[in-house]
């Protein structure tokens, strides 16, 4: 008997894996339990789209730092009712807004470079996650993300609320050479992004496409013709590193939730 024929697994595992039907049943069971654990909390959380849109569900609602309920118009930015009418006037706390031109360019870099392969952008509603990353992510925060960047692997930390956590200078140094800041980091160096100018034509095209998406398209009253026409001026002369940092700095701080904990403190 060659070594290849030797079965190293335990008898139970071996028997299970050789029985197609049993494997099917057990896999289905595992998927069902996993699915339920993910889906059931959605019925009990406010603002998962099942709340009827008024920001409350089962008597719960999102709270701000002082414990006050956050109203729906502070969860999704609505220029018609907000004191700040344009993307340039928008302030953190006004609610989820579409990406600005430079952020959108940075988002394309994020996807192109495969940052999502090591970073998730989805804080789950568990205490350990909240203590580490801040308030759990809510559905509205991904509404203008086509495609969403939730990710499924965390080689590095979740980035859903990285916006405003570090200075631009920190990001420049970290993205250029992550090990200059965190000696044990396994993140690749991205110093060369500085030498790549932002792709203006592609970003302008993306702005236009965002107004045509089938789900939650960006209203044309936000990406107005004037805004799109002005975009090349905002993008020209910028490089991919600057765009990426603009994108990162805008992540997760659109709604003013309770304060999270900075785990690097
Ligand atoms: C091979 C996996 C890997 C890839 C790819 C990767 N990172 Fe990271 N990243 C890490 C690890 C590990 C850390 C934690 C150590 C550190 O800070 O460098 C990290 C940390 C970070 C942090 C700091 C997060 C925090 O809360 O402290 C940011 C921001 C970041 N990465 C952005 C990016 C961006 C943008 C890209 C794509 C251009 C990227 N990463 C690609 C692994 C990766």
Image: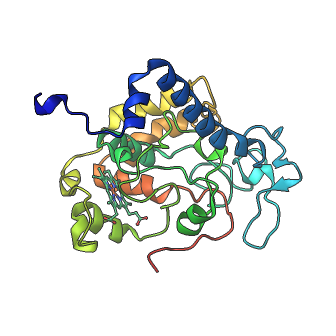
Among all residues in the image, which is located at the extreme bottom? Answer: 265
Position of residue 41 in the picture relative to residue 54 (left or right):
left
Residue 230 vs 129, above or below: the answer is above
**Percent of width and height locating residue 247:** 43, 52
Residue at x 27% of width, y 68% of height: 173
Residue 6 vs 193, above or below: the answer is above
Quadrant of res 261: bottom right
Among all residues in the image, which is located at the extreme front? Answer: 1
Among all residues in the image, which is located at the extreme right? Answer: 59
Quadrant of res 37: top right
**Percent of width and height locating residue 168:** 38, 67
**Percent of width and height locating residue 218:** 60, 34
Tell me which image quadrant ligand 1 sits in: bottom left
Count of numbered badges drawn on the protein: 0
Is residue 239 visible in the rendered structure shown here? Answer: no
Residue at x 23% of width, y 72% of height: 183
Indicate the quadrant containing the N terminus: top left, top right, bottom left or bottom right. Answer: top left
**What colouring style does the render use?**
rainbow
Among all residues in the image, which is located at the extreme top? Answer: 21
Position of residue 220 in the picture relative to residue 83 (left or right):
left
Is residue 95 visible in the rendered structure shown here? Answer: yes
Residue at x 29% of width, y 66% of height: 174
Residue at x 46% of width, y 56% of height: 159
194 or 228, which is in the foreground? 194
246 or 8, which is in the foreground? 8
């Amino acid at each position: 008997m060659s070594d290849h024929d030797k079965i190293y697994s335990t008898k139970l595992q071996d028997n299970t894996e050789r029985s197609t039907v049993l494997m099917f049943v057990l896999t289905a069971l595992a998927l069902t339990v996993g699915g339920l654990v993910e889906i059931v909390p959605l019925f009990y959380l406010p603002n998962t789209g099942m709340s009827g849109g008024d920001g409350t569900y089962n008597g719960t609602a999102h709270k701000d730092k002082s414990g006050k309920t956050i109203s729906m118009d502070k969860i999704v930015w609505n220029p018609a009712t907000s004191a700040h009418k344009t993307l340039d006037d928008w302030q953190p706390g006004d609610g989820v807004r579409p990406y600005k031109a430079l952020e959108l360019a940075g988002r394309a870099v994020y996807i192109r470079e495969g940052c999502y392969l090591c970073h998730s952008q989805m804080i789950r509603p568990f205490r350990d996650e909240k203590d580490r990353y801040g308030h759990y992510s809510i559905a509205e925060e991904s509404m203008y993300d086509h495609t969403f960047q939730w990710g499924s692997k965390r080689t590095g930390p979740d980035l859903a609320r990285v916006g405003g956590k570090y200075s631009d200078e920190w990001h420049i140094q970290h993205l250029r050479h992550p090990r200059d800041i965190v000696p044990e980091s396994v993140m690749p160096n991205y110093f060369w992004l500085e030498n790549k100018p932002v792709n203006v034509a592609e970003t302008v095209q993306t702005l236009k496409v965002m107004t045509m998406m089938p789900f939650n398209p960006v209203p044309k009253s936000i990406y107005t013709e004037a805004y799109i026409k002005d975009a090349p001026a905002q993008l020209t002369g910028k490089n991919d590193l600057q765009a990426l940092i603009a994108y990162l700095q805008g992540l997760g701080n659109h709604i003013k939730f309770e304060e999270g904990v900075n785990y690097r403190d």
